């Protein structure tokens, strides 16, 4: 019985490590994989390098991202860090940026 009592702190440390480190990392990894597998044409994305653009085409392991007018880069799906899908329910003003200055008719 004393042998089991001496192992109790080690088991407790392992359990705490799993709860605080391994489990959240696994969840994050699954979420990123789900995000990258669901990429579609027209999605606004941020690449892991911090570049923003719109997906113009997608293949199995690569996506084409338009980062400026006439500038399309081909990157690996794994390079996509975040997606901002455009919904049809967005406001009709066409401005997604709340910090943008008002246009002539909005003042």
Image: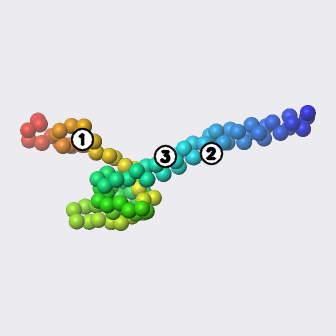
Q: Residue at x 43, y 49 (%)?
A: 35
Check the image and name the residue furthest to the front: 60
Q: Residue placed at 38% from the left, 62% from the top?
A: 59
- Does 70 sit left or right of 28 as displayed? left
> Label 3: few (<14), some or many (≥20) within 10 Å?
few
Mark 1: which secondary structure?
Answer: loop
Q: Which residue is mark 3?
A: 31
Q: Which numbered disc, 2 or 3, marks the residue that appears first in the sequence? A: 2
Locate residue 9: give its quadrant: top right
For the N terminus, the quadrant is top right
The span from disc 2 to disc 3 (Cα, nearest Å) is 14 Å
What's the CA distance linking mark 3 and mark 1?
A: 24 Å
Picture layout, residue 105 above or below residue 44: above
Q: Residues within 10 Å of mark 2 (few under 14, many from 20)?
A: few
Task: Answer left or right for 78 relative to 25.
Answer: left
- Residue 22 is labelled as 2
Which tag is nearer the camera, tag 1 or tag 2?
Answer: 1
Identify the residue at the far left of this view: 105
Q: In percent of the image, x 11 and y 35: which residue is there?
A: 107
In the rendered structure, are the residues bearing label 3 and label 1 in contact, judged by CB atoms less than 8 Å apart? Answer: no
What is the x, y in percent for residue 14? Answer: 72, 42
Compared with 18, 50 (above or below) is below
Q: Secondary structure at mark 2?
A: helix
Name the foreground residue: 75 vs 39. 39
Number of the front mark, 2 or 3: 3
Q: Percent position (x, y) of residue 32?
A: 47, 50
Q: Earlier in the sequence, mark 3 or mark 1?
A: 3
Element type where label 3 sits in the image? helix
- On the question of residue 67 being in view, the answer is no
- Relative depth, front residue between 92 and 49: 92
Give the residue pinned by disc 1: 88
Of residues 34 and 103, the one nearer the viewer is 34
């Amino acid at each position: 019985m004393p042998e089991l009592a001496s192992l109790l702190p080690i088991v407790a440390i392992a359990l705490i490590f799993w709860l605080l480190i391994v489990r959240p990392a696994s969840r994050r990894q699954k979420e990123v994989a789900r995000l990258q597998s669901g990429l579609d044409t027209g999605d606004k994305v941020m690449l892991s390098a911090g570049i923003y653009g719109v997906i113009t085409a997608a293949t199995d392991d690569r996506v084409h991202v338009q980062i400026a007018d006439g500038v399309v880069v081909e990157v690996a799906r794994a390079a996509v860090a975040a997606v901002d899908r455009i919904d049809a329910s967005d406001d009709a003003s066409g401005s997604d940026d709340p910090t943008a200055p008002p246009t002539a008719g909005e003042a």
